[in-house]
Amino acid sequence: MVVDDDRDIVKLITQSLKYEQFEVIPAYSGKEALSVLEKHHINFVVLDIMMPEMDGLEVCRNIREKNNIPILFLSARDKEIDKIIGLEIGADDYMTKPFSIQELTSRIKAHFRKVDRLYREWSGHSQETEINTRNNASPLVLNEKTFEAFLNKQKLDLSTKEFQILSFLMRYPNNVLTREQIYENVWGDEYGDLNTVTVHIKNIRKKLGAQYDFIKTIWGVGYKYVEGKD
């Protein structure tokens, strides 16, 4: 779904994505976008921030209350703080206007290639659909087939990228992983900024809660996943 109150931008993006064999549903306001989500199964959202009545940030908050559809913000706001705010409320990616339609298309295609690779990898591990650490009594369990995470049997509301980051960290417990390694594994050949990793890690920690300090920062290097005393 492409959401923007500028019909020319929606038309440009729609034509480009249809050329790449994507099915696209347009929406020209925040309220219309939420209505579309109630009627259709959407796999990816390109979402403008600056819209009248209901802006993209509010739309994103509404979406995140119900599901984890990947969201790419498209905005004229190009300050670093605007990007951080967008990512912190649940967006998976952020591009500023004016934008390259080729880059936007590449980012969306890269997302689906990444998801396809993950499904192929995970389908080869049918008996390993759940990940926890070597500690079988781990309170945190991920189900890679359903992209669901459970903490003490309570489902966590993680975005797609947050789930992928946590899954990657948990596969290598007690190993230090650099931001570059995390970015390459989760975003692959997408365009982007390494600071995106930092923001997503912050969001994961917030959702886990202070009691579960599983993700340790190794200053100047990266992060590692541990349970119990480090």
Image (spheres, helix red, strand yellow):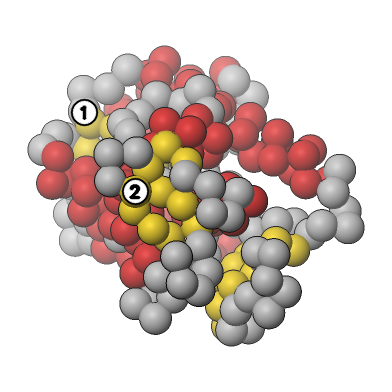
Q: Nearest the camera: 60 or 176?
A: 176
Residue at horizontal 39 percent and vertical 37 percent from the top: 179
Determine which quarter of the picture holds residue 63.
bottom left
Q: Nearest the camera: 70 or 31?
A: 70
- Residue 104 horizontal side relative to residue 70, left or right: left
**Residue 169 location in percent, x, y?**
54, 51
Residue denoted by label 2: 218
- Residue 78 horizontal side relative to residue 197, left or right: left
Numbered-mark total: 2
- Is residue 150 at least partly visible in the picture? no
Q: Nearest the camera: 188 or 87?
A: 188
Alpha carbon separation for disc pair 1 and 2? 35 Å
**Residue 14 location in percent, x, y?**
46, 29
Residue at horizontal 52 percent and vertical 39 percent from the top: 186
Residue at horizontal 27 percent and vertical 63 percent from the top: 58
- Mark 2 residue crowding within 10 angstroms, few (<14) / some (14–19) / many (20+): few
Q: First in sequence: mark 1 or mark 2?
A: 1
Res. 97 mark: 1
| Secondary structure category for the residue under label 2 | strand
**Residue 28 location in percent, x, y?**
33, 46
